[in-house]
Amino acid sequence: MNYKILRVININYETIFDDFKKKNINKNNHFNLKKSFFDQSYMYCNSFSEKMVEIGNDAVDVIYNFVELQNLWYLENSRNKSINLEKNLDEKLFLIFLDQIKFYKPEILYFQHCAPFSSNRLKYIKENNSFIKKIIFHNGFTLINEEIKNVDIIFAALPFLKSYYISKGIKSKLIYHYFDENILNKINQKIKKKNNTIFVGKTGSQKDKNHFSRFNLIKNLIHENSFYFFSLEKDRDNRSKKNLKQVLRNIIIKNTKIIPKKIINNLINRFENNKLIRLLEDSKKPTPEKYFLHELYPDKIYNAVYGIEMFQLLSDNNFVLNIHSDESINHCGNIRMFEATGVGSCLLTDHKQNLKDLFVPGEEVISYSSKSEFISKLNYLQNNLNIVQEISKKGQERTLKNHTTKIRVKEIDDVIQREL
C-alpha cells in the first residue's frame, strides 16, 4: 500500500541560513523559497521525498526551524489565522507545525534525527491526530530515554545505536546514511584533483568527550602540509554573530590587559561612567581558556562550508579525512563516508569492525587505526596517484551502487510497508 509521509528536518547549524541568505534567491512565496533552499544541497535535501514519490508514496518536507519559510507557509496555507507571528519563537514554530500536520494529514511522521521539541509535544501530536500511524526517527547519535518516548520506530544510522534502542524497548532497524546522487549534476568533477587532504566537520574541543579523539588527531596534524580543516563548531557559529560593538569591546579589553592592575584600579576609582567601569573591571579578569581548535590555531582552522560549496571542495581534492565520534565505539557509518566517496574522492577513515559491510578496505577506501598508520598510508598514496585514482573510482562506484538515496528509501519503504 502507498502512504503519505511528512519528513521533518531541523537545521542544527544556524550559519547555514546565513550562508543561504547570501545567495541570489527567489523568496516571493513558500514554494520558491523552499526550492531555492533545497537547490543548494544543504544537509538532508529533498532527494528523500523525490525518491519516495518515485515509488508511489506522497511525500512532503518541512524545515521546522527555517523561520522565514514557515512564516510563508502559514500565511499562504493555514486556516488558523490566530497565530501571532511575533510571539515566542518556540511556541510559534510548534503551532505552525501543528497546522501543517492537520493540512497534510500524514500517515507517517518522519523526523530526520529526532523531534525538535519535547516528548510531551510528540505525545500530544500522536493523541490528537488519529491519521498518524507511525512516528519514526532516522537517528545518528544517542538519544536519552526522555527523547525517545512516543516513538514507534528508530532507524539507527550505526549498528551500536540499533542495539542501544532495542535495549530501551524501542523497535529499531539499521538504516545507514546515504549520498544524494543528484549532487553529481551540481558540481564540476575535475579530472585532475589537488593533492590535498580535506576535513569538514566538528573539530571538537578539550571539553567535548564525544569528539576528543578527533580533537587530538587533528591537533597532531595541524602543522602538516597539504591539510585543510573546516570547522562546524556551534560555538563558532555563535561567536561569528557578535555585533561590531561587542567585537570592539573585546579588542579594548584585550589591549587593556597589558596595563598594570594598580593603574586600572586607580582609573576605576576616578571614573563615574558605569559602562567604562564595567569595561575596566572585565579587563582585570583572567583571559578565558581556549578550548576549541579554531581558538588555538585560528590560521589553520577555516570557517565552515556547506552545500554545493562543500561538495565541490571534497570533489576538488584527492583525500578526505574522516574521524567518527567517540560514542560510535567500534562502528562506522557517518554521512561523510558516503559524501566523500560519492563525489569521487579517496576516503581515509578510522577503522571500525563493520567497515567491511560498507566498503572494501584498501580497495574502495583507506582505513587507519593510529596517527602513524594514517601518515604512513597517506604518504604512500600521495606518491602513487594512480592507486589513488583507482581507489577513488571504486569507492564512488560502490556508493552509487549501494549507498544512494534511492537505495536507502527502498530499505525504509520496505520497513514501513511491513509495519503498516
Image (cartoon, rainbow, N blue to C red):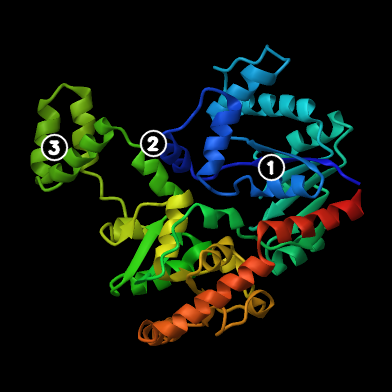
Helix, strand or loop at label 2? It is loop
Give the Cα separation between the discs numbered 1 and 2: 28 Å
Give the Cα separation between the discs numbered 2 and 3: 46 Å
What label does residue 328 carry, if any? none
What label does residue 265 carry, if any? 3
Give the Cα separation between the discs numbered 3 and 1: 51 Å
Name the amino acid type tagged 3: Asn
Name the amino acid type tagged 2: Lys
Q: Earlier in the sequence, mark 3 or mark 1?
A: 1
Q: Which residue is mark 1?
A: 115
Position of residue 47 in the picture relative to residue 215 (left or right): right
Is residue 311 in view? yes
Q: Which residue is mark 2?
A: 22
Residue at the top extreme?
A: 82
Q: Where is residue 210 drawn, in percent x and y?
A: 54, 63
Tag nearer the camera, 1 or 2: 2
